[in-house]
């Protein structure tokens, strides 16, 4: 099975997406075609993001909890190992990268341009959701 770390913003968009590339990515996960590799950092950031007005207006409390519960049950949750790589200016980006490394995920799916500019880091391929879905042929 393909393993990939998915960043917070992609997951948050996936919680509300009904069509498009991110919906395709979430559907592939729900169908068991991919295993998401996440960390406590990503889950905490996701919960905080989903409470923001934009997402709260599109996802009620019950559906927010259900989405988070699904992630907890069906994703590989890894502990971040020290040292956390200091590759980018934004510490949160470094923690997402550390998640992929700790989980031995060959892919990191992110909309973050700084992460995408790396392209590859220690055998982790960093792709946009579009690039990843196209690569997988979904």
Image (cartoon, grey):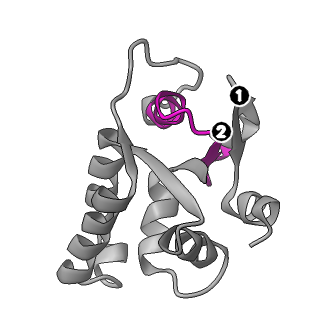
Quarter of the image with the N terminus in it: bottom right
**Circle 2 sits on which residue?**
106
Q: Is residue 63 left or right of residue 91?
A: left
Q: Residue furthest top?
A: 83
> Does residue 112 belong to the magenta stretch?
yes
Residues at circles 2 and 1 in contact by the CB criterion of under 8 Å: yes
Image x and y of residue 84, in percent: 44, 18
The magenta segment: 93-113
Q: Can you identify the residue that label 1 sits on?
A: 123
> Residue 131 in the image: x percent, y percent?
77, 59
- Out of 45 and 53, give the one closest to the viewer: 45
Q: Quadrant of residue 79?
A: top left
Q: Tag 1, which secondary structure?
A: loop
Q: Is residue 61 left or right of residue 114?
A: left
10 and 28: which is toward the camera: 28
Residue in the image at 26% along x and 81% along y: 63
Classify mark 2: helix, strand or loop. loop
Report which quarter residue 33 is drawn in.
bottom right
Residue 114 image offset from top left, x and y in percent:
65, 38
Position of residue 73 measured from the top left corner of the image (x, y, whole percent) = 29, 60
Q: Nearer the viewer, residue 116 or 69?
A: 69
On screen, 80 above or below 53? above
Residue at coordinates 67% horizontally, 74% vertically from top-left? Answer: 21
The answer to whether 131 is drawn above or below residue 20 in the figure is above
| Image quadrant in which you'd find residue 16 | bottom left
User: Residue at left 68%, top 22%?
Assistant: 122
């Amino acid at each position: 099975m393909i393993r990939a770390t998915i960043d917070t913003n992609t997951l948050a968009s996936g919680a509300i997406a009904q069509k498009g590339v991110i919906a395709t990515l979430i559907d592939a996960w729900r169908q068991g075609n991919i295993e998401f590799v996440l960390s406590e950092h990503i889950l905490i950031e996701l919960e905080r993001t989903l409470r923001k007005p934009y997402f709260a207006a599109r996802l009620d409390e019950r559906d927010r909890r259900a989405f988070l519960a699904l992630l907890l049950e069906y994703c590989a949750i890894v502990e971040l190992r020290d040292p956390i790589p200091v590759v980018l200016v934004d510490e949160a980006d470094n923690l997402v990268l550390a998640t992929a490394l700790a989980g031995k995920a060959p892919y990191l799916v992110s909309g973050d341009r700084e992460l995408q500019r790396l392209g590859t880091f220690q055998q982790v391929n960093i792709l946009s959701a579009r690039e990843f879905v196209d690569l997988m042929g979904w």
